[in-house]
Image (tube, helix red, strand yellow):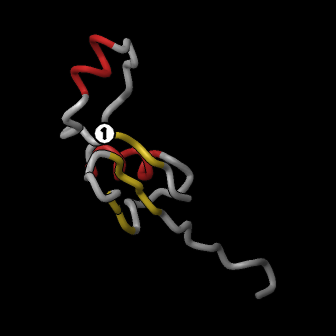
Amino acid sequence: MIPGNFHPQNPAKELMDSVLEWNLIHRTEADMNSLFLASPFKRPCTRVRFEEQGIDLFAECIKEERPRPGS
């Protein structure tokens, strides 16, 4: 799974919030780890990547497979 999010260091945050009334939730790498830990993944991000401008982050998480019955 690879959800994306805007990082709090987004230089356009004030413009987006105030002028455009586009109130997004900005999350840090730690915030994304917390989301995955609280999810069925039950683990932190496998990797966090940023796009070229460093505004959008993409948190990758690979869910560990459970052993199948009889395996």
Which x, y percent locates residue 38? 45, 45
User: Eyeballing the image, is 27 above or below 56?
Assistant: above
> In percent of the image, x 26 and y 45: which residue is there?
28
Which x, y percent locates residue 36? 44, 51
Q: Quadrant of the C terminus?
A: bottom right
**Closer to the camera in the image, 42 or 11:** 11
Residue with the mark numbered 1: 27
Disc 1 is placed on an element classified as: loop
> In percent of the image, x 30 and y 17: which residue is there?
17
**Closer to the camera in the image, 38 or 61:** 61
- Which amino acid type corresponds to the residue marked 1 in the rendered image? Arg
Q: Is residue 28 left or right of residue 48?
A: left
Q: Is residue 14 left or right of residue 61?
A: left
Which x, y percent locates residue 12? 24, 30
Which x, y percent locates residue 68? 75, 78
**Closer to the camera in the image, 47 or 68:** 47
**Which quadrant holds residue 25?**
top left
